[in-house]
Structure formats: C-alpha cells, structure tokens
Amino acid sequence: DPKIIQKPKYLVAVTGSEKILICEQYLGHNAMYWYRQSAKKPLEFMFSYSYQKLMDNQTASSRFQPQSSKKNHLDLQITALKPDDSATYFCASSQEGGGGNTLYFGEGSRLIVV
Amino acid sequence: GEKVEQHESTLSVREGDSAVINCTYTDTASSYFPWYKQEAGKSLHFVIDIRSNVDRKQSQRLIVLLDKKAKRFSLHITATQPEDSAIYFCAASKLGYKLTFGTGTSLLVDP
C-alpha cells in the first residue's frame, strides 16, 4: 500500500481556474515537501514544512499556497492556473526536516493546464 | 544557492557491464548526497546516499564515490540488469537545507 497518497493522480484544468492537490502521508514523518517536475526544468523544490510550520519556500509566485491542516497532510492550492504550471507535482516526506534525511515520494499528481 | 549538475543525460550499457553517472555540486558546505531512481511513469525511490564524512559507500551492486575537493560524486552500478533501466537523479544538500536535484540520467540496460 502506498504510504504517501496523492490525489488526484491526473487532472486537466482550464487556464485561470484553481485546483487543490492533496497529499497525506502515513509514515509518521514530521516533515513534508512539494516538488515539481516538468519537461523544462529538473525536479524543482517548492516548499517544506516541519511540524506543520513552513520552513522553506522557493516558489516565487503567491499563486501556490501550501495548506497543512494536520501533521500528516500538506495540500497545495494553485490559483489562476497558467499553461506553464503544467507539470507533475510530487509530495514527499521525511522523518525530520532539513538536509540529511531520506525523502519518500508520493506517486505524483500530473496537472495539465489548457 | 546550491546547483547540481548531472553530466550524462542518457547512458546506454549492455547487461552485465557497469554504469557510471557523474554529478558535480557548487556549495562546499553541502554534506549529504542521495541518489534516487525513477522508473517510467512512476515516482522517485531512494537508492543510496553518502555523507561528507566518507568518500565511498557500497550497497550491493551500488557504489557511491565522493570527491569533496572536486565537488564531485558518482554512482556506479555494477553487473547491470535490465531492471536497472530508469532515470537516476543525484541530489545535494547542506544539513538543515532542502535537497537540490540534478537533471536526471536516463539509463538503458540492453539485455
């Protein structure tokens, strides 16, 4: 059984709309992350949370907002979607935050913006 | 910030041969260097890592070498098998900081 659940696996959205990507981890980890993988760029760090607090934000646009309602949840809200947002979004977790900890990745949510 | 360059974008080897993937990094303070494997259409899975207090680590057929002076690290896969075919990502980080990934190397092992 997957220990990091991401929903939806695939979605198509219209330019200008808003979507929420869901992530839940059942590994008992204290840190969670979002990464983006697109054809144009390498795996790109977006956010990290540790004990439900934002630790690092490397996303320039405020259109991307992480939301952590519980320690094992880290959702990603994306507003005013653009075609350039098309990518696979990976949620990950680690026992503790910061470097030196093994990341475990979810299966990804593939977003296509038309 | 840290930048990680992965030198081989594609690599093709014959089954049973060794494969070597090379990465370089820019931040001398980086101390943690993991490798991840991504099979077609799937997620990333951790395969092996090395920390800056050692220069070599082996786990079965995987060997990681670290040259801190050259800011270079490499993954060696010995006795390759078709199931080793995947995209391999190197990464680097300082303690307490995010992982920065390379661009990935697509390894094809021909049976």
Image (cartoon, rainbow, N blue to C red):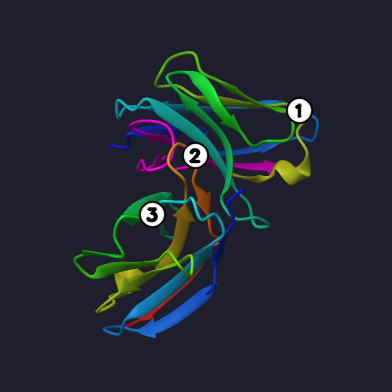
Above or below A75: residue B29: below
Spot occupied by residue B4 in the image (x, y as percentages of width and height) = 55, 59
Residue at the (77%, 44%) spot, across then down: A83
- Tell me: residue A45, above or below residue B32: above
Is B22 or A44 nearer to us in this picture? B22
Closer to the eye: label 2 or 3: 2
Which residue, as the protein is rendered here, is positioned at the far top?
A: A69
Residue type marked 1: Ser
| Quarter of the figure with the N terminus of chain A | top left
Q: CA distance from mark 1 to mark 2?
A: 33 Å
Residue B43 point in image, percent of width and height:
43, 49
Q: Are marks 2 and 3 on the same chain?
A: yes
Which residue in the structure is indicated by mark 3?
B34
Q: Is residue A90 magenta?
A: yes
Question: Which is more foreground, mark 1 or mark 3?
Answer: 3
Q: Is residue B41 in sight in this rendering?
A: no
As helix, strand or loop, the secondary structure at mark 2 comes to loop
Q: Amino acid at mark 3?
A: Pro
> Any mark on residue A17, and which?
1
Q: Quadrant of the C terminus of chain A?
A: top right
Query: Which residue does the numbered mark 2 point to in the structure image?
Result: B97
Under tag 1, what secondary structure?
Answer: loop
Chain letter behind tag 1: A
Residue at disc 3, secondary structure: strand
Q: Report crowding for label 3: few under 14, some 14 to 19, many 20 or more residues within 10 A (C-alpha).
A: many
Residue segment shown in magenta: A89-114
Residue A46: name its quadrant.
top right
